[in-house]
Every structure is written in structure tokens, then in C-alpha cells.
Image: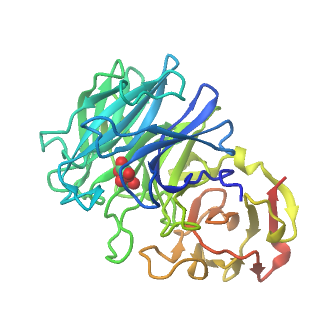
Amino acid sequence: MNKNKIHLKAPGNWINDPNGFIYYKGNYHLFYQYFPYAPRWGTMHWGHAVSKDMVNWEHQGVALFPTKYEDQNGCFSGSAVEHDGILYLYYTGVHYNQPDPNDIHQCLNDDFSSAQLMMTSQDGIHFDNFHDKKVIIPPITDRKIGDKTHTRDPKVWRGKDAWYMVLGSKTLDDKGELIFYKSTNLSDWELVNTVSKESGLGGMWECPDYFDTEGGKVLVMSPMGITEDETLEKNHSVCTIVDFEEETCTMEIPDTYQFLDYGLDLYAPQSALDEQGRRVLVAWLRMPEPVDGTWRGMFCIPRVVEVKDGHIYFRVHPNIEKLYTRRIANAAEADSAGYKVSFDIGDGETVNIGGYKITRNGNRICTDRNGVFPKNTNFRMQLSTPEVKDGFHLDVYVDANLIEVFVNRGEYVISNAVYGLTNEIQADAMEKIAIDTLE
Ligand code: FRU
């Protein structure tokens, strides 16, 4: 299988969040949370991949790794910006005050400190982990501002008059919180404001991302504990349209939100501007077990974020969409990078793609992966969109371990990890099913 076409996959062992996503000097750079020693989470490095088109990805090895007291136990998530040709990386360094003596990649009693660090690169290829790191925000000591342990994931952007940074944190009473900083030189950062919600919206807010679009200002974040079922995953990414006043970093976050993706497997998304200035976003696909016993974790298709009439759409990036030009009669003829299945679905109809079932129930699109997923995990097996408004057209992108169901060209998306798909596609009305693959 072509491992890194369409979807960027772990080069082996473990990856989680996308980091430092940027179009820089003619290439897309995508870094990622990487544990190089086993297919499970542990001491975090930043792996690095580059691409000319966000279709073909090439792994570049490790860009960031622990070298300082502050990042001794991991280089956690962060972001990238360019200024005067230089690439600036921002990330969270963690230091375990109580490493687990039996597994030094884990911390005991949640006793660790988090600092914010930066590092630069002249070309996006060379990173000097020994000499180029700088602590820009030490662990927070004033609990009224944020949490010394759970403050992380700097997202930096260029505003009108300055550079801005948002961090995820939690309030004194354990509600999710954003902390905003400002800088004129990318190196000295001044606290501007903290934002939380009276009603909560989960606990700590991981991986915040803020950006403006033509149709509205968007906040994307990953609140911990936003769903309540004890036996199932509780941390999920959400997005919502916000009011934001840049200079004072005042943000009004409404009570209503959309899940980023209704498969509830994608997490910790990060956005960047593409070559043509579109807002494009990728996210980590959580996977319950390694593939072939060797690799675990991949990213979804890059999605263009658009806001229309108060709704946030996630459209397949045109670089990917335009590749599926070869019509085939069945999935067995598909390219190793996968295929796309397109159809309009009638009420009560089911389309079964290799064991993954998609059904329309009234105005909702529902999926069931019981046939193609390990049993007894904390992942959800049956998923559903809210009521859709724009029609009942589905474009389903199928790769060996990830199915992405784009409903009405991104009104909602359900993306799910899958294991052991067959090549068989079954539908009540096969004649209306189109299957396309790469040339
Ligand atoms: C989200 C997250 C981030 C953190 C990173 C550590 O998945 O928990 O908040 O920086 O992963 O790997």
C-alpha cells in the first residue's frame, strides 16, 4: 500500500496531533506528535513530513526532541508561523516532577509542569534542538491566570497590529479556558486576556485554534470531558462561530457548537492557510490498535473550512477531490491509495462499503462499523449527523483504515477508523453508485 498518499500516516509506532502546519517556501510542512519507540503514546517528539500538494507526503524524520529541563519529558503540541523567511515553531515543553519509575514515558499523579517554548529554522529542514530553543512563557504560577500543569498547545497567528497566541488551559474551578498573549517581535510575549464560559463546555480545552473566514470568525478546540458516557471516549473536538475583538482578545463563545466531525474519532485539529489562501484543516484519527502491529495514528484528508449562514462546512480540499477521475466497476479495481463512492441516499436505504454501513434515517445520515472494528474498545460504533438541510448527497472517501463520509459536500462529515474492510460494495440500488479512483 502507498502509505502516505492522500492520508499522512505514522512512519511507524505512534503519532497523535498535527503540529506546525504551514505552507512555507513552496512546501506544506506538517509536524506531528510522535513517539518513536512503540505504537503507544509516550515522550513526545515532533515528527516532520513535507508535501508539495498535500497529496504525496514525505517523512523527514524527527524535527524536535527533548533537550532542555523544560521539555525533558516531551515536546507537546504547537504551531508555526513565517516571518522574513524564517520559520518559527511554538510548542509546549513538559517536565515530569514525578516520572513513573516503571515507565519513564508516563508521569505519576498528573504531577508535571508545562512551559511554552519557541524554536526557529532558516529553511524548515534544519532544527538545532541544542542551541535554538527559548522558553518564552514559563509554567504559570498564578492559579488565577491558568494551570501550571494543564496549559498548552500554543497557536500563533499574525493579527492586524501584532502577533497573537492562544493557549488552552483550565480555570480555578476546572472549566476550560483560553489564555491570549501578544507580541511585536515573536519572542517577547505579554498576557492580554483569559476567556472561559460560565456554563463550562467540558474541562481543560486542548489545542485551541482561532481564525477569521469570509463568513465568520471561528474557534476550534478540543475540550476534555465534553461527552459524559463513562465507558466511551469523552474528549472531542468542536467548532463554533465566535465574536472576537483582537486588540483586547475579548471572545464571546456561544453555547451552541458543532462537532468538528460526527465520527468522533478525529481529534486535535489544526488549520493553516494553503497556497491560495484557503483555510485548510487536518486532524488526528484516533485508532484503537496498531495496523500490522507496527503503526498507529493518521491524519484525515485536508479540509477547507467555510462558513455560510452561520454553519461551518468542511469540504474536501480540491487538490484531493480532483484526483478521483478513473471510474471503476468495483472496489477491487481501485488504486492502493483508495477510492471514492458517490451517491444520493434515499430514506431508509443502506449502502454497505466493505462492511461499513451507511444508512439514511429521515434527515440524518447514520453509520455502523460493527463489522469492521475491534470489539470492546471505548470507541463509538454507531454514529449520526444532526438533521441535514442541504440534501442527501454523499461522497465517501475510502482508505484501508479510514472512511470519510462527506455529507452534502461538507455540511457534516463522519470519519471513522476501520479495520479489515472487504472489497465488496452493496446497495439497494447499485445503479446509482459511482466508484472513482486515482489515475
Ligand atoms: C491532544 C494533546 C495535547 C498535547 C498533546 C500531547 O491530543 O493531549 O493537548 O499537547 O496531545 O501529545
Viewer-side residue, 331 vs 119? 119
- In-image side of 211 versus 358 (left or right): left
Rendering coords of residue 353 (x, y %): 70, 75
- In-image side of 5 versus 104 (left or right): right
Question: Where 269 falls versus 391 (above or below)?
Answer: above
Viewer-side residue, 385 vs 110? 110
The chosen color scheme is rainbow
Residue 89, by quadrant, is top left
Viewer-side residue, 386 vs 72? 72
**Residue drawn at point x = 34 percent, y = 76 percent:** 229
Viewer-side residue, 426 vs 113? 113
Q: Is residue 249 visible?
A: no
**Residue drawn at point x = 19 percent, y = 50 percent:** 171
**Residue drawn at point x = 71 percent, y = 76 percent:** 422
Rendering coords of residue 80 (x, y %): 46, 33
Residue farthest toward the front in the current orientation of the protein? 102
- In-image side of 164 versus 139 (left or right): right
Image quarter where the N terminus lies is bottom right
- In-image side of 131 versus 316 (left or right): left
Number of marks present in the image shown: 0
Residue 154, by quadrant, is top left
Rendering coords of residue 120 (x, y %): 43, 25
Q: Is residue 46 visible?
A: yes
Question: Where 162 falls versus 47 (above or below)?
Answer: above
Rendering coords of residue 44 (x, y %): 38, 48
